[in-house]
Amino acid sequence: MSYGQNKIKLNNQKAQLFDLDTISYKLIKGINGTEIYFVREDFEVSSNQKITLELKEYSNSSYFIFIDVKTNGQRLGLKKNRRIPMKIRNKNLMRCKIYYSKFGNNNSFNWIGQTKYSGVMSFDEEWQIDVLKAVRSDSINYYNYTDIDRVEHSSLIYPIMIDKLGWFKIE
């Protein structure tokens, strides 16, 4: 058995499976409110391979989430410098910390602190369009903008962007 914080049996959490077939883009919503924006081109996969996304969610004083993306039973890898955008319901994510798990001795979790990235809308000079950009969460304010009435707005779209698959703890 694998345990997280407070001896929670994370491996026993119910898996939610999403058959993405060959879809290019999809907003995935978990039963506990997790939203994942799936972009097929972010993964090392051919255009005709069918994809399945597995999601597990658990919430107590921390929020635990498991994400896995597979084709034909094999885990897919994210392409270099690509991230998975996500939101978590009812959680103040601006000041939270994020941890990634690696299994240790006795099938326990070893939580490793991660640099937190967020997704902001940013104007791309080359393409002359707004694009989703992954930035370190401590620099989000740099991307805020002021409208014509001098009201400041946030460019934040996704509070968390992850760059690997597996278990995450957000607290």
Image (tube, rainbow, N blue to C red):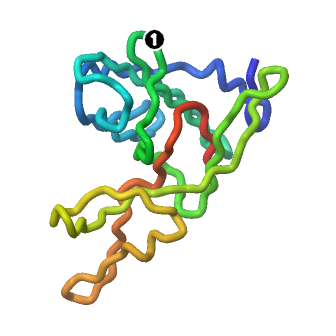
Q: Is residue 163 above or below residue 118?
A: above
Q: Which residue of the protein is positioned furthest toward the bottom in this rendering? A: 150
The residue drawn where x is 34% and y is 67% is: 155
Q: Which residue of the protein is positioned furthest toward the top in this rendering? A: 72
> Closest to the observer: 76 or 3?
76
Q: Which residue of the protein is positioned furthest toward the left in this rendering? A: 128
The residue drawn where x is 59% and y is 33% is: 58
**Where is residue 126 shown, x and y percent of the image?**
20, 65
The residue drawn where x is 62% and y is 50% is: 98
Mark 1 secondary-structure assignment: loop
User: Can I make out residue 86 in this image?
Assistant: no
Badge 1: residue crowd in 10 Å (few <14, some 14–19, many ≥20): few
Q: Which residue is mark 1?
A: 73
User: Can I make out residue 122 in this image?
Assistant: yes
Q: Picture quarter containing residue 57?
A: top right
Where's the N terminus, which quadrant?
top right
Please count the marks in the image.
Answer: 1
Task: Determine whether, in the image, residue 106 is placed left or right of residue 91.
Answer: right
Task: Determine whether, in the image, residue 158 is placed left or right of residue 27.
Answer: right
The residue drawn where x is 35% and y is 58% is: 133
**Where is residue 103 shown, x and y percent of the image?**
73, 27
> Closest to the observer: 107 or 60?
107
Q: Is residue 103 above or below residue 37?
A: above
Q: Is residue 37 above or below residue 124?
A: above
Q: Picture quarter containing residue 106?
A: top right
> Closest to the observer: 75 or 79?
79
Q: Amino acid at mark 1?
A: Gly
**Where is residue 156 shown, x and y percent of the image?**
38, 63
**Where is residue 96 shown, x and y percent of the image?**
61, 57
